[in-house]
Amino acid sequence: MRKKIVAGNWKMNMTPTQAVELVNTLKPLVANDEVDVVFCVPAIDIIPAMEAAKGTNINIGAENMYFEDSGAYTGEISPKMLVDAGVKYVVIGHSERREYFAETDETVNKKVLKALEHGITPIICCGETLTQREQGITIDWIRQQIKIAFLNVTADQAKTTVIAYEPIWAIGTGKTATTEQAEEVCAAIRICIGEIYDQATAEAIRIQYGGSVNAGNAAELFAQPDIDGGLVGGASLKPDFGKIVCYK
Ligand code: PEP
């Protein structure tokens, strides 16, 4: 049985002061040991959020990192810095990073390898545009993203990763994929992992759905056989996040 994982993606929201307040508000609401709970927060919020979350079931994650250990990369955050701060999860290749910061499947692969080298669990994002869905190429597109993201990743490493399937047209739009659409793609991702590696790896890897997940739709989405939780944007900033984590 795969343990569900629900991760919040705060995006570029919350000052350090607000981050502490939000962690304190959500602490009692997300206390559910049956689910891995992660708050992926802006880099400047990591340390105060970590302090505020001490002694709780909340893991603090990062929203991005660079694929080098250190050096002349002004403005970037290295995996060593994340490890030193106690970070265990990092979102890699979110569609907003791909759209606004020119991330590609190749940079995603480099970041995935680097995160794994440092023992950080990457939450690897993939997803199609509305045009791609309408063209009927969703599964082909996602399979290509997955194959490139996992280049040179071993089966043992792959088992520890998390994949977030996030249809781009459903992110921040209030439009959720139907349960059938979400399950279809998550199942296809699992098949693809099975083809790259083996059945055991496909069974072990956790696949989240992301895209306008809220307190009203989480239970049905997370009940699907291939959906192991969610990556949640907007609703992760509200007390409703507690209802998503405690979806049962
Ligand atoms: C996200 O930021 O990954 C996301 C899914 O956002 P939202 O839940 O707001 O659609």
Image (tube, helix red, strand yellow):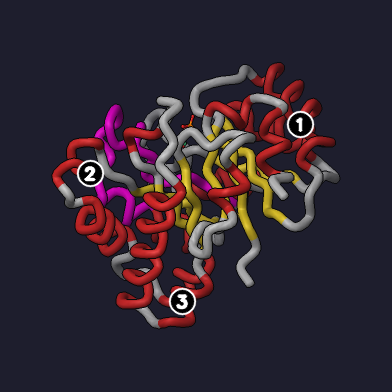
Q: CA distance from mark 2 to mark 3?
A: 27 Å
Residue at left offset 19%, top offset 43%: 132
The reply, left or right, for residue 36 in relation to residue 13 is: right
Query: Callout 1 environment at 10 Å: few (<14), some (14 to 19), or many (20+)?
Result: some
The reply, left or right, for residue 98 in relation to residue 186 is: left
| Figure quadrant of the N terminus | bottom right
In the image, residue 185 lies at what x, y percent?
Answer: 36, 56
Q: Which residues, given as a range, are shown in magenta?
A: 89-111
Residue type at mark 3? Thr
Q: Secondary structure at mark 1?
A: helix
In the image, residue 231 lies at what x, y percent?
Answer: 52, 43
Q: Nearer the viewer, residue 43 or 78?
A: 43
Give the residue number, with chain letter if any, for mark 3.
201
**Taking 201 as reference, is 133 above or below it?**
above
Residue type at mark 2? Arg
The reply, left or right, for residue 48 in relation to residue 56 is: left
In the image, residue 52 lies at what x, y percent?
Answer: 79, 32
**Taking 242 as reference, is 199 above or below it?**
below
